[in-house]
Amino acid sequence: MNEPKRDRMTQAQHDRLATELAELEGPRRTEVVQAIKVAREHGDLSENFEYHAAKNEQGLLEARIRVLRSRLQQAEIVGDAEAGRVAVGSVVEIEDDSGSRLEVEISSVGGAGAVSPDSPLGSALLGAAEGDTVDVNAPRGAWRATVVAVRS
């Protein structure tokens, strides 16, 4: 049987997911249960919009909790990289051949500006240092990126 894919993340990224999970399992879950209880008290459930909305929110909440638990169980904590080298958790500024600049975080956790270490760009950048030029073999075509800056 195939072993589940391991999400490589820094301890800080792992801690962020664990904090989100604690919030969802604690206060958020309590709020949703209370909203369902209050909506039930309004009577006929077949036409009770508040009840259906609260139950929908509960389903979304429980789905997110399952995803977070799974990701935390499958997490592989990576250590700090060599100074100046791109690693999981690094924030990297790159420039393409046309001079366009982009700042990305190498992260399997996701979020704004995040690039998976397993993606074409992420895997090309891992191990690179400032000034290095990497070849990115993306589905839409190959391109080159120059590492302008690396921050941990």
Image (cartoon, rainbow, N blue to C red):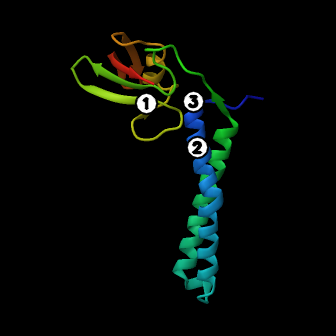
Which residue does the numbered mark 3 point to in the structure image? 10
Q: Amino acid at mark 1?
A: Glu
Q: Is residue 138 left or right of residue 110?
A: left
Percent coordinates x, y for residue 110 in the rendering: 49, 38
Q: Amino acid at mark 2?
A: Leu
In the rendered structure, which disc, 2 or 3, sits on the residue that comes first in sequence? 3
Crowd tier of the residue under label 3, counting other residues whose Cα lies within 10 Å: few below 14, some 14–19, many 20 or above? many
Give above or below for 56 relative to 137.
below
In the rendered structure, which disc, 3 or 1, sits on the residue that comes first in sequence? 3
Q: Which structural element holds mark 2?
A: helix
Single out the residue that lies furthest toward the top. 132
- The residue closer to the viewer here, 120 or 105, is 105
Which residue does the numbered mark 1 point to in the structure image? 105
Percent coordinates x, y for residue 67 in the rendering: 62, 47
Q: Is residue 76 left or right of residue 1?
A: left
Label number found at residue 17: 2
Q: Amino acid at mark 3?
A: Thr
